[in-house]
Image (tube, coloured by chain):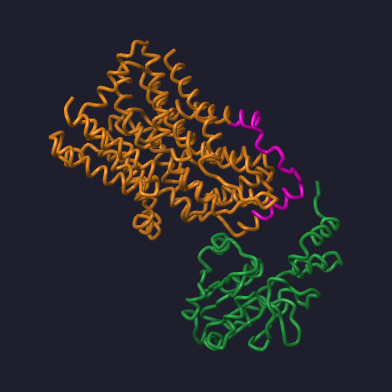
Amino acid sequence: MKLGGPDLLHEARDVLGDDLPVLDYVLSGLLEGNPPPPIDGTKVAAALHDPASVLVVGLEAFFMDALVVHLTQCRIGLVLGEGGLEGDLRRIIANYEDRVELVKLGDVQRWAGNKSALCTFVYGVRERSCYVQPIWLRMAGSDIRTQFRTLVGWDVLGAPTPRYPRWLVETSTEPFSRMVTL
Amino acid sequence: MTTARIVMPTILVVTLILQALLSRRRVLVVVMGAGLSCLASTLLHVAPASRLLAEVPWDVLIILVALGVLSRMLAEARLFDRLAVLATSISRAAALRIFVVFSVVMYVVSGVVNNITALVLVLPVLHVLLKLISPQQRYVSWMVGMVLVACNLGGAATPIGDFPAILLLSGGRMTFSGYLVQAAPATLIALLILLGLILLLVRPARGIPNDPVSAQLTQRIVFAMHRNIRIDKRVFIPAAISLGLMLLAWTALPASWGITPELVCWLGVGLALVLRHQLGEKLIRSGIDSEATLFLLSLFIMVVGVRKTGVFESAALTIQHLPISPTLQLVVFLLAAGIITGIFSAGPSMAALLDVADSLARRLPPNAVYVGLALAVCAGSSLFLTAATSGPIAQAITERANLREPGGRYLRFGFFEFLPTGLVAFAVIETVAIGYALFSLA
């Protein structure tokens, strides 16, 4: 039996869309015949400029998968904050074997340096603003961001969302040294 | 009756009661109990502490420690993650199938590796499934309870599955293949009867929606959560080869060579660790279950102290002098073993009852006595949540999983939630134990 199709997409959007606006946006795109493009980490890896270490802030699992395969020569850390949708940390890290280390907020500065980079996932990018996972606000503070050479934002949706993306927070695009779109 | 025959058993019994009551301090309690046993034994001229230590069955401890390390190595190879995903795939995330598949998987896995490693790694995947299928309290209680019972049955199925069976393998009471041939079918029959009874009479999955869309979504989520998990062949292959060689040696080496089971285990696991020496060093340093080892070592010391007073011989004689046939004497012994295990847990009761079993085995077919005892101890381990170490661990992991009913009500798994499963499991496994013993005597 084949499952899925527009009826279920409609139902998923009706049931979950209010709570999960990003999912709502993706489902709407699917219903309008615009599936999300394939995820490719090449441009983000290039924007990071051959780093010695990369701290990824927040998580989009499939994007992270696509990025990790391109960062074979550097340390990769993952900083996850509280609030929003919380995941199973053990399960998350297990999927990256020994490639990705979970980094606590208090240990972030151990990763700083002139060949270190920060990368986060951004949503609904407009000219001067975008939405980010709340933990990014702490990382983008002037005390931390200046200790990293590169700050890259990875636009996971490729367009502004019509609805306010609950669980995320609005911030300026100004601190980012590069913004990479799908 | 000498003072020693009162003092030594009293220290043992009081320690066992205290460790059952103060389960969070149980290792400390038994370690201190063992120290007091040594002191009393010395002062009462039963035997010096050095004699008690010399009579500890070190072979059992070596097998336990070595197989524990091998279990950790298999876990490092991500074997259990893959097994859990395979179980999800086979069950197709349908409540009834999940119940059967996870019970069978835990039974099979527990026959080879220790229960706790298997539980700690497989239960989280089961919890993800439980969160996604909109479970009810009765389903969670029976499901997690059945997983625990299946662990106990799997542990009793093979001579290396759990401590009671290992104890039988040591000292030459039974051969590896001799135990396996007798115990595996009996435990499998117990598992099938238990599953049949629960599924037909209790129907734990009743009331859980059987929606194909939800089932497929559930499977997809579990697969996505394990999307990049592959068995690490560099770790798995040495561990598997080592386990295969050990199984071969246990079954094929002639006893006249004097290469004992614990020596096979020591060298076999050592080989696996040497082949992955970096991981091997790490596991040797930090992968040994010191809690279980210290717990059992302390129990053995206390049991040896009591044995030295001749109390166990008297207990065996009491059973032998019961005015009933030897067959009924064995039945009484097996029933008592099950109940004592339910109260004091498998380690203490098996260590204490084995002397009585040795005495019975001189008059009755040894396999009827020993395998019957292992099954009875398995029944007792399944009676209460606190009767086996895996019970409180499953409780803690399940509570941390924060399972909820669709209405939001928190789902519990504790002593009383487990009790119905425990009572049914005890009745079935104890019946199989007695049935097996009677069949062997016929």
Q: Position of residue B84 (x, y in %)?
A: 58, 48
Viewer-proximal residue among B159 and B373: B373
Residue at screen point 29% across, 32% down: B171
Figure chain in green? A
* Relative side of A101 to A131, left or right: left
- The question of residue B197 being in magenta is answered with yes
* Relative side of B369 to B194, left or right: left
Residues drawn in magenta? B195-222
Q: Considering the image in quadrants, where does the N terminus of chain B appear? A: top left
Vertical arrangement, residue A113 with respect to residue A78, above or below: below
Vertical arrangement, residue A15 with respect to residue B164, above or below: below
Q: Quadrant of residue B114?
A: top left
Vertical arrangement, residue B33 with respect to residue A130, above or below: above
Q: Is residue B169 visible?
A: no
Residue at screen point 45% across, 35% down: B381
Q: Position of residue B310 (x, y in %)?
A: 21, 26
Figure chain in orange? B
- The question of residue A28 being in magenta is answered with no
Q: Position of residue B399 (x, y in %)?
A: 54, 51
Viewer-proximal residue among B174 and A9: A9
* Relative side of B227 to B387, left or right: right
Q: Would you say the magenta stretch is mainly helix, strand or loop?
A: helix
Q: Can residue B377 be seen in this view?
A: yes
